[in-house]
Image (spheres, helix red, strand yellow):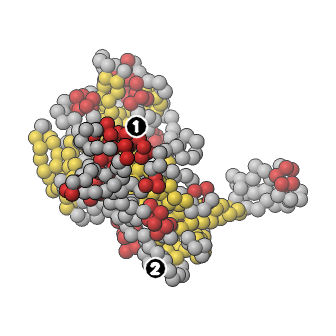
């Protein structure tokens, strides 16, 4: 790599001085030495500035790139997406001339919209969402985010050359926030962006983010890959985000994250911000994940994910010590679905999963993503540790079932003392099952009705609707058993087995 002379007018005198100090006595008359000369060493010359500042093989790993050319090519593939949906009703109920609108009798509201007294307030309004998308095929298939086009009645796409087209939703996957749309008329001259391999990204790789932030027009920003494999952020159900410091703002959603080969490596999705604007932390869905989902949506109209049939949690040192497990990394099996693939293969509660098909799993997010990347019916090899012995089990994955949500309530409560004194519980009966949506598969335990906000239990994540099944491996069959066992806890910690929805997990409560 060569440094153009025009880029270093202030640096050259300093570099001359540095080279003079470093090489004084070896070369004469260094006061007039132009260190930007590129005479190869094999011919009796000196190292060039680029050779002095870079490793010998850097030319091979980091060839010279023209950022402007890369950006110009890529921006032709990034589009603006405007989605419109009709929202019916402006109030709570359809009664009266205002249709339940809280503004129906507000004279200012009527003056602002030039509405005379007595005229009914419209019960429909059109809400518009702006975002970005990436053309990935020559016939007009576009990758974007689900939240950009969710529930849209109308989708319009504006190309880089300002041509506007109607588009239709081919399919969406809310669990990963990926959506696929297609231009209704396949225009000529589309320039699809090649999809790269996001698994090859490394920390500090340079990337460009392209989109339409705040609707101001197509914008290119540059940054680096700050991290990969970001999960458990609460943005989507399935997360494996690329983190970047390339500026991403509202409107960039669905836009392109590209590498220096001009390939799509991510779909910009979200930012971490306390202000609503860019603060240096942005997230993009890896191209490998987006491509797999797109292929499934185009071929079948849906995304089918593999299902292992276990409740899992990341194993840390504290939890491992509490359970007497030597293994301090991996994913802990907190529960096994009675009729699931894991149960049939012999996986048990308390097993620690280390790898699937040879791919190490260090967190619940990694395991979920690996399993979900396989279709149902696919056989995988699960490497796990049980009783300090490593085992390998072959599991035929099933289809991910749909689970429901639970409403809240407050049945009669029982309170304990000591470390677990901040927890109120009730018996697991028909009333508490109905109130908290407790699965029929959970046949015993004490239902948590309330948790004191600053208690040790609250800090550990225990909340209303949880069902406590064990305390320090002692069974808890009902509220009375909870009080009896909880009152015997004398130390500074207690290991709880907690059922949530149709699965269980271990929770360590500490002072």
Q: Of the numbered discs in the image, which one, if any, rests on residue 119?
A: none
Vertical position of residue 378 compared to residue 238: above or below: below
The residue under the point 69% across, 52% down is: 92
Q: Nearer the viewer, residue 409 or 345?
A: 345
Considering the image in quadrants, where does the C terminus appear? Answer: top left
Where residue 109 sits: x, y (%)? 82, 52
In the rendered image of this protein, does residue 93 appear above or below residue 19? below
Circle 2 crowding by C-alpha within 10 Å: few under 14, some 14–19, many from 20: some
Q: Is residue 25 left or right of residue 388?
A: right
Element class at badge 1: loop
Q: Is residue 278 left or right of residue 374?
A: right
Whether residue 487 is visible to the viewer of this picture, yes or no, is: yes
The picture places residue 130, in percent across and down from the top left corner, at: 59, 61
Q: Quadrant of the N terminus?
A: bottom left
Q: Which mark is residue 139?
A: 2
Mark 1 or 2: the one toward you: 2
**Which residue: 21% across, 57% down?**
43
- Up-down: is 457 above or below 187? above
Q: CA distance from mark 1 to mark 2?
A: 50 Å
Q: Secondary structure at mark 2?
A: loop
Picture coordinates of residue 170, whole percent (x, y):
47, 72
- Residue linked to disc 1: 466
């Amino acid at each position: 790599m060569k440094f153009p002379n025009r880029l270093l007018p202030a640096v050259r005198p300093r570099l001359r001085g540095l080279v003079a100090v470093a090489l004084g006595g070896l070369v004469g008359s260094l006061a007039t030495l132009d260190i930007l000369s590129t005479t190869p060493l094999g011919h009796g010359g000196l190292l060039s500035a680029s050779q002095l500042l870079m490793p010998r093989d850097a030319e091979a790993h980091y060839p010279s790139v023209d950022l402007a050319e890369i950006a110009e090519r890529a921006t032709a593939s990034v589009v603006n997406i405007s989605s419109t949906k009709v929202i019916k009703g402006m109030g709570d109920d359809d009664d009266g001339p205002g249709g339940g609108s809280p503004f129906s009798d507000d004279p200012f509201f009527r003056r602002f919209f030039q509405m005379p007294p007595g005229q009914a307030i419209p019960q429909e309004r059109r809400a518009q969402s702006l975002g970005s998308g990436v053309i990935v095929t020559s016939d007009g298939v576009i990758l974007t985010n689900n939240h950009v086009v969710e529930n849209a009645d109308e989708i319009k796409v504006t190309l880089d050359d300002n041509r506007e087209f109607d588009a239709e939703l081919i399919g969406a996957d809310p669990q990963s926030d990926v959506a696929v749309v297609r231009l209704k008329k396949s225009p000529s001259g589309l320039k699809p962006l090649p999809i790269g391999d996001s698994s090859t990204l490394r920390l500090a790789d340079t990337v460009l983010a392209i989109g339409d932030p705040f609707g101001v027009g197509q914008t290119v920003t540059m940054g680096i890959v700050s991290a990969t494999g970001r999960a458990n952020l609460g943005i989507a159900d399935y997360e494996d985000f690329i983190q970047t410091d390339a500026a991403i703002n509202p409107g960039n959603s669905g836009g392109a994250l590209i590498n220096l080969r001009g390939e799509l490596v991510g779909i910009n999705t979200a930012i971490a911000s306390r202000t609503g604007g860019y603060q240096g932390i942005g997230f993009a869905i890896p191209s490998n994940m987006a491509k797999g989902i797109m292929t499934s949506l185009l071929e079948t109209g849906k995304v089918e994910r593999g299902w292992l049939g276990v409740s899992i949690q990341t194993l840390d040192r504290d939890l491992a010590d509490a359970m007497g497990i030597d293994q301090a990394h991996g994913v802990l099996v907190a529960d096994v679905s009675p009729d699931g693939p894991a149960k049939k293969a012999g996986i048990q509660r308390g097993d620690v999963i280390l790898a699937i098909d040879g791919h190490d799993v260090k967190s619940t997010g990694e395991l979920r993503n690996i399993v979900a990347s396989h279709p149902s019916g696919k056989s995988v090899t699960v490497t796990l540790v049980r009783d300090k012995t490593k085992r390998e089990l072959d599991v035929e994955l099933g289809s991910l079932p749909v689970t429901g949500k639970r409403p809240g309530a407050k049945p009669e409560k029982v309170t304990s003392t000591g470390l677990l004194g901040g927890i109120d519980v009730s018996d697991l009966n028909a009333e508490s099952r109905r109130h908290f949506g407790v699965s029929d598969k959970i046949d015993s335990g004490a239902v948590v009705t309330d948790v004191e906000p600053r208690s040790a239990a609250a800090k550990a994540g225990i909340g209303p609707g949880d069902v406590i099944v064990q305390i320090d491996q002692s069974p808890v069959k009902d509220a009375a058993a909870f009080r009896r066992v909880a009152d015997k806890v004398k130390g500074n910690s207690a290991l709880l087995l907690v059922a949530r929805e149709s699965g269980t997990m271990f929770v360590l409560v500490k002072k």
